[in-house]
Amino acid sequence: MHNVSMDTELHVITPNDPGILGRVLGTLANAGVNLRAISVFAHDKEGHFRLLTSDNKKAEAALRTLGYKVKVNKVVVVEISDRIGAGAEIGALLGNAVIDVDYSYGSSSGKGPALLVFKTNNDKKAYETLR
């Protein structure tokens, strides 16, 4: 069994400018919000941040003051042991349950548990499958 929860992430859309990573993360820090997991990519002229934070309401308010678009998405969060093959086991469970993963990202320090975040075509079924 894994530590599985339903959570929310913030999808923040910014200009794709040099220094944007520092501005977004600095804004969170100044708001007193801890970052639990992050995924960042650029598409066209936009930066896309998927953030799992300690306080989404504070984070969203702070980021909106900068004029950034912020969307809230439900996601499945899984805490697993940080060991070889642990992620593969999660992937196999989802695949065997015929759950399509839209995207995933994670966070690990290399010591202790790792955190995986999933957006799927059926988050409720993914949650039930992984509990």
Image (cartoon, grey):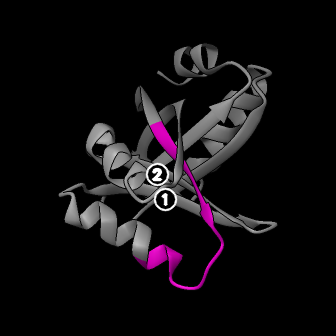
Q: Which mark is residue 111?
A: none
Above or below for 39 versus 72 = below
Asked if residue 13 lies in the magenta stretch, the reply is: yes
Rendering coords of residue 69 (x, y %): 55, 48
Left or right of 21? Residue 26 is left
Residue 27 or 34: which is nearer the viewer? 27
Identify the residue at horizontal 42%, vertical 49% (top origin).
Answer: 64
Quadrant housing residue 29:
bottom left
Mark 2 and mark 1 in contact? Answer it, CB < 8 Å: yes
The stretch of residues the image draws in magenta is: 9-22
Left or right of 121? Residue 1 is left
Secondary structure under tag 2 reads strand
Q: What residue does disc 2 label?
A: 51
Identify the residue at horizontal 73%, vertical 36% (top origin).
Answer: 101
Q: Is residue 113 visible?
A: no
- Is the residue marked by circle 1 packed among few (<14), some (14-19), or many (20+) residues within 10 Å? some
Quadrant housing residue 23:
bottom left
Rendering coords of residue 119 (x, y %): 63, 34
Rendering coords of residue 61 (x, y %): 33, 44
- Of labels 2 and 1, earlier in sequence is 1
Above or below for 18 versus 9 = below
Specify the farthest residue to the left.
32
Tag 1: residue type? Answer: Ile
Asked if residue 14 lies in the magenta stretch, the reply is: yes
Q: What residue does disc 1 label?
A: 38
